[in-house]
């Protein structure tokens, strides 16, 4: 197995500049160099993160949500109808008009009753504010700790201020213990996010999040193997600098603290636009694409690493567009209406489920009022008919 990996996956021309071999960067006494086998511990670490998250949410996040006033919407439960339940589990979407007619004939229900049942059933599966708060708080804690720890370990390094230092003596650059664990921990965390994607809140940018997680894992793993650790630490700290602000804004949004949420969102938007649209392409991508060429000839790892960075930059532009839409709404309405980036879960239909439910309730109220008026009118008509009939009966003898 090791021979196959060395022959097909870890070939020197893939991950090292021309003329450099694995022996040239062998670990010397007292120094650590990146080795592909180091990445094997990221999967057990991801499972540890999942277990730690489970404990964190139940012991810390849920009690904290109650202290902050997070409340869950009381939803109407759909009545148990086996045929409709089977259809819902198999399809998970709004049935078409023809399917509604068939289901109505099978269950003996009307068109509107079928649609109402599916709406209530979908609402049952919608995540509660408490679930969304727990997810946001877990990410907030990790991103905040990772950012503070990374900043503390990088602030004194020469490549933090001068990015050309990322390529001095490349690839024979020893890795400190702090940066080694920063890499391994970040990769294990993103593995945990990818493994939990099916149970986490499904948001509007679900597909983009999947692409982001996969690209990040490949970027971390391959950059570690190619010893792009110095520039890789800068990429991670740029991302972590705004992520914890977004998660904190979500937490206060679910708790109903509107002013705090709006303030944090504005700060997040400024930091995100500055780091992802200015610092990331202008300093980091420029360094990997242009500055690095002064130190070595391009190779496969160079092209692959930069391609992944460009994929991340494309996602940054997509999210920046969503954020600017929210900032535009905030400037005119004075508050953040909804998180266009990822705060709202994806909808199977174009209309909002809760708005339709409220519309149904108002319709039922109007219908009840109308029925009471019609009943009153009918009673009045009956009473008038009976009164007129008695009056006519009393006049008949006189007429005779």
Image: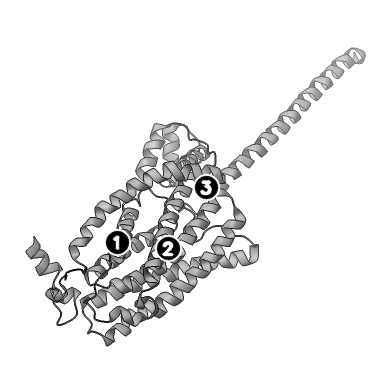
Mark 1 or 2, nearer chain start:
2
The residue where tag 2 is placed is 148
Mark 1 nearby-residue class (10 Å; few <14, some 14–19, many ≥20): few
What percent of the width, then of the height, locates residue 237?
39, 68
What percent of the width, then of the height, locates residue 44?
25, 51
Q: Secondary structure at mark 2?
A: helix
- Up the image or down, 64 lies above or below 109; here it is below
Q: Mark 1 touching mark 2, by CB under 8 A?
A: no
What percent of the width, then of the height, locates residue 25?
17, 74
Structural distance between the alpha carbons of marks 1 and 2: 14 Å
Mark 3 or 1, nearer chain start:
1
Residue extending farthest right: 398
Q: Mark 3 touching mark 1, by CB under 8 A?
A: no
Mark identifier at residue 181 = 1
To which quarter of the image does residue 225 belong? bottom left
The residue where tag 3 is placed is 353
The residue mark sitting in front, 2 or 3, is 2
To which quarter of the image does residue 81 belong? top left
Give the tally of numbered discs. 3
Q: Is residue 231 left or right of residue 246?
A: left
Q: Is residue 33 left or right of residue 84?
A: left
Name the residue nearer the viewer: 127 or 377.
127
Structural distance between the alpha carbons of marks 3 and 1: 44 Å
Residue extending farthest front: 30
Q: Residue at x 55, y 61 (%)?
A: 264
To which quarter of the image does residue 361 belong? top right
């Amino acid at each position: 197995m090791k021979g196959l990996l060395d022959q097909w996956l870890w070939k020197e021309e893939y991950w090292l500049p021309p003329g450099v071999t694995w022996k040239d960067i062998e670990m010397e006494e007292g120094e650590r160099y990146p080795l592909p086998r180091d990445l094997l511990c990221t999967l057990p670490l991801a499972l540890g993160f999942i277990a730690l998250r489970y404990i964190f949410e139940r012991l810390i996040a849920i009690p904290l949500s109650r202290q902050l006033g997070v409340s869950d919407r009381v939803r109407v439960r759909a009545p148990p109808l086996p045929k409709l339940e089977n259809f819902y589990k198999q399809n998970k979407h709004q049935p078409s008009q023809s399917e509604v007619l068939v289901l109505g004939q099978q269950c003996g229900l009307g068109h509107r009753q079928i649609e109402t049942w599916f709406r209530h059933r979908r609402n049952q599966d919608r995540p509660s504010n408490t679930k969304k708060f727990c997810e946001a708080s877990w990410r907030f804690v990790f991103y905040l700790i990772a950012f503070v720890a990374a900043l503390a370990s990088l602030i004194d390094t020469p490549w933090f201020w001068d990015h050309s230092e990322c390529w001095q003596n490349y690839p024979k650059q020893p890795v400190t213990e702090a940066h080694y664990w920063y890499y391994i921990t970040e990769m294990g965390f993103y593995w945990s996010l990818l493994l939990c994607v099916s149970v986490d809140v499904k948001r509007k940018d679900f597909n983009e999040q999947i692409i982001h997680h996969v690209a990040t894992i490949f970027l971390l793993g391959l950059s570690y193997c190619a010893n792009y650790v110095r520039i890789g630490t800068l990429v991670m700290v740029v991302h972590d600098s705004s992520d914890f602000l977004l998660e904190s804004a979500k937490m206060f949004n679910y708790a109903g603290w509107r002013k705090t949420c709006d303030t944090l969102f504005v700060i997040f938007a400024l930091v995100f636009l500055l780091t992802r649209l200015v610092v990331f392409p202008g300093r980091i991508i420029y360094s990997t694409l242009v500055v690095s060429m002064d130190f070595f000839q391009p190779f496969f790892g160079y092209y692959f690493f930069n391609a992944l960075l460009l994929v991340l930059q494309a996602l940054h532009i997509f999210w920046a567009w969503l954020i600017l839409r929210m900032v535009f709404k905030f400037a005119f309405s004075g508050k953040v209406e909804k998180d266009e980036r990822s705060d709202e879960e994806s909808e199977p239909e174009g209309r909002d489920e809760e708005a339709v439910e409220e519309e149904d309730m108002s319709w039922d109220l109007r219908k009840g009022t109308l029925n009471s008026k019609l009943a009153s009118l009918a009673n009045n008509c009956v009473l008038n008919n009976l009164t007129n009939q008695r009056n006519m009966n009393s006049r008949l003898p006189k007429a005779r």
